[in-house]
Amino acid sequence: MTSSSSSHKQDILRVKTCVEIELRCVEKDRNKRPSVKDIVQELQELEAEIKKMSLDSENSEDLIGHV
């Protein structure tokens, strides 16, 4: 996967997650809405996952370059 396609995939994941959060935030039943704490935690987990994806992608590219 090239750096550009990896970045594109990460952007799509970010947008998808934000839209999913947004949809939960407008639930008619306020008890189904996420708290700010829940949203922050979800976004932090997303960024950790994206960082891991970036590192995995960089490691794969390094391995390919050394073959």
Image (cartoon, rainbow, N blue to C red):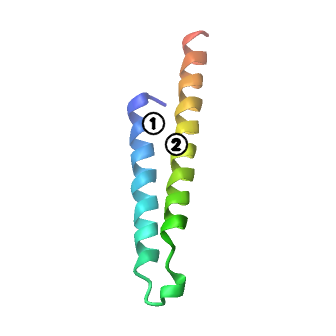
Figure check: 38 above or below 64? below
Residue 33 image offset from top left, x and y in percent: 49, 79
- Type of amino acid at the residue the image marks with label 2: Ile
Task: Please tell me whether mark 2 sits on a helix, a strand or a loop.
Answer: helix
10 Å crowding of disc 2: few (<14), some (14-19), many (20+): some
Badge 1 is on which residue?
6
In space, the residues marked 2 and 1 are separated at their CA atoms by 10 Å
Task: Please tell me whether mark 1 sits on a helix, a strand or a loop.
Answer: helix
Residue 67 image offset from top left, x and y in percent: 61, 10
User: Residue at the location (55% across, 58% down)?
Assistant: 41
Quarter of image, res 42: bottom right
- Type of amino acid at the residue the image marks with label 1: Ser
Q: Earlier in the sequence, mark 2 or mark 1?
A: 1
User: Residue at the location (45% across, 36% down)?
Assistant: 6
Residue 22 image offset from top left, x and y in percent: 40, 70
Badge 2 is on which residue?
50
User: Depth check: 25 or 65 in front?
Assistant: 25
Which numbered circle lies on residue 42? Answer: none
Q: Residue furthest front?
A: 37
User: Residue at the location (54% across, 21% down)?
Assistant: 61
